[in-house]
Amino acid sequence: MRLRTKVTKGAGSRAAALAMVFKLVESAQARWRAVNAPHLVALVRAGACFERGELLERPRTLAA
C-alpha cells in the first residue's frame, strides 16, 4: 500500500483506499496459516498461558 500511495500522491478517494486494502488482505489471505485448535482461541483471548502446548494452571510469576 505504501508504494501505491506514493504513485497516486495519497490514497485517492475513500473508495480507492478501501479497494486497495481489500486487495492487499485478499492476497495476504492466501499465505495465512489455519488455526490448528480453534477451541483454544477463547482461552488465549482470556489470557490463559500455554507452555509447550500444555495449559498452565497457574502461570509462573517472575521474582523481582
Image: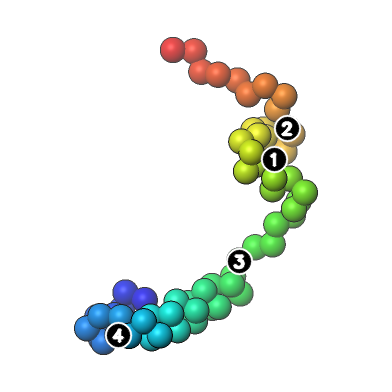
Q: Which residue is mark 4?
A: 12
Q: Name the residue beneath numbered marker 3.
A: 32
Residues at discs 4 and 3 in contact (Cβ within 8 Å):
no
Looking at the image, the residue that sits furthest to the front is 14
**Label 2 CA crowd tier, 10 Å (few <14, some 14–19, many 20+):** some
Q: Quadrant of residue 1?
A: bottom left
Which x, y percent locates residue 30?
61, 74
Left or right? Give the position of 10 relative to 45. left
* Vertical placement of residue 51 versus 1, above or below: above
Which residue does the image show at 65% across and 63% down from the upper left? 33
Tell me which label, 2 or 3, sits earlier in the chain: 3
For label 2, the residue is 55
Disc 1, SS: helix
Q: Mark 3: which amino acid?
A: Trp
Q: Nearer the viewer, residue 45 or 35?
A: 45
Labels 1 and 4: the sequence-earlier one: 4
Which residue occupies 44% across, 12% down? 64
Tell me if label 1 and label 4 are in contact, CB under 8 Å: no
Alpha carbons under labels 1 and 2: distance apart:
9 Å
Q: Are marks 1 and 2 in contact (CB under 8 Å)?
A: yes
The picture places residue 3, in percent across and down from the top left corner, at 31, 78
Residue in front for this viewpoint, 39 or 56: 39
State the CA–CA distance, disc 2 to disc 3.
25 Å
* Mark whose residue sits in front, 4 or 2: 4
In primary-sequence order, the first of circles 1 and 2 is 1
Badge 4: few (under 14), some or many (20 or more) residues near its Cα, within 10 Å? few
Task: Report whether residue 20 is seen.
Answer: no
Secondary structure of residue under mark 2 = strand
Circle on res. 43:
1
